[in-house]
Amino acid sequence: MFADLHLHTTESDGTWTPEELVREARGAGLAALAVTDHDTTAGIEAALKAARKDLQVIPGIELSAAGHNGEEVHIVGLWINPAYEPLQNKLTALRKERIARVEKILDRLDGLGIFLSEADVQEFSHRDVLSRSHIASAMVKKGIVQTKQEAFDAYIGQGAPAYVKRPKLTPEQAVELIRGAGGVPVLAHPGLLTDLNVLPSLLDAGLVGLEVIHYSHTEKQTQHFLEVAKELNLLPSGGSDCHGPGGKDHIYLGKYKIPWNWLEDLAQARDGLK
Ligand SMILES: [Zn+2]
Ligand SMILES: [Zn+2]
C-alpha cells in the first residue's frame, strides 16, 4: 500500500477538483492521499466527502514562507484541523495583504504611465487570488509587453521599478501554525532549496518531517535526504506534488509515492503531538 502526501487541487493552482483528485488517486491505486493546497484549506471538505473506505484522505496544507535569505520555503502540514481559528485568521490576513500588494503594484505601474485596472487583471484569475502572473498576462493582452517574462524583467519582477515584496510567513511561523492546528509539519521539497540552513531553527520550532520523495528529487537526492532525515530525527515523507493535467508540470500522480510504514510513523507522531 502506498500514499501520496503532497497534492494540489483547483482550490490552489491544480487543475483537478478535490473530487477528481480523489477519483484519480483511487485509479492510480493509492491507499491514502493528502490534499495540500497552497495557503488554503478550501478543498479538504470536498475531498473528505469523496473518500471511501478504500482511500484515506488526509487534510493538509502547503504554507509558503520566506526564509532568512529571501528564498521561498514551503511547509506541508498533514492532519491539520481546518477549523483552527488562528490558522484561518492568518490565511485571511495574508490573502488581504496580497490583494493590497496587487493594488500597490498597479499604483506603481500607473506612476510609470502604464494604466491597468483591477478588472483587467481579474480577467486572468479564476479565484479571488490575484498574483503578479495575472498582472503580467494583462500587460501582454494590452500590448504593453510581448511576453509575461518581459513584464517581470522590465516592470514587476524583483528589482524592477514596480516590484512590491510579497507578504509571507517565516518558515518557523508556518511550522508553529501547523502544530497549533494539530498537524504534522514537514519541510517540502528540500532539493529545491539552495541551502538547508533553515533546518536548525525549524527543528526548534517543532518540525517533524522531511520530504524525501518528491518529483524534483534525483535518486541521489532522495538517498541524501533519507540520511539527513535519519541524522536529524525527522520522519521521511513525500509525494508527487501533482498539479493535474495541463497544469504547471507533468502528471506525477502515482509515480512518486511513499511506503505505508512512513505514513504509519507520521500518524504515530501526530498522536504523540497531542
Ligand atoms: Zn511547494
Ligand atoms: Zn506543492
Image: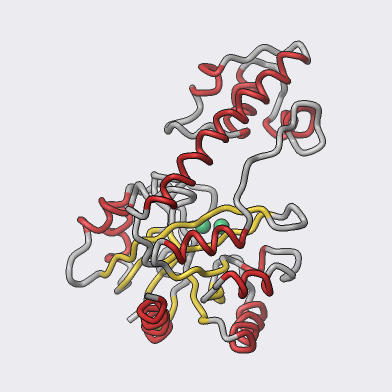
Splitting the image into 4 quarters, where does residue 1 fall?
Answer: bottom left
Residue 273 higher or lower than 77, as above or below: below
Asked which colour scheme the image uses, the reply is: secondary structure
Where is 99 relative to 258, above or below?
above
Could you say which is closer to the camera, residue 159 or residue 151?
Answer: 159
Q: Name the quadrant where ligand 1 sits.
A: bottom right
The image position of residue 52, as x and y in percent, is: 18, 65
The image shows a total of numbered marks equal to: 0
In this view, 6 is above or below 167: below
Left or right position of 111 against 51: right
Q: Nearer the viewer, residue 15 or 87?
A: 87
**Residue occupying image coordinates x 58% and y 34%:** 131
Residue at 34%, 60% in the rendered image: 81
Q: Position of residue 212 (x, y in %)?
A: 56, 76
Q: Nearer the viewer, residue 159 or 218?
A: 159
Give above or below for 65 relative to 178.
above
Judged left or right of residue 15, residue 69 is right
Residue 195 spot, x, y in % from top left: 75, 68
Residue beneath the point at 66% across and 24% down: 104
Q: Position of residue 236 (x, y in %)?
A: 52, 80
Image quadrant in which the C terminus is located: bottom left
Q: Residue furthest left?
A: 53
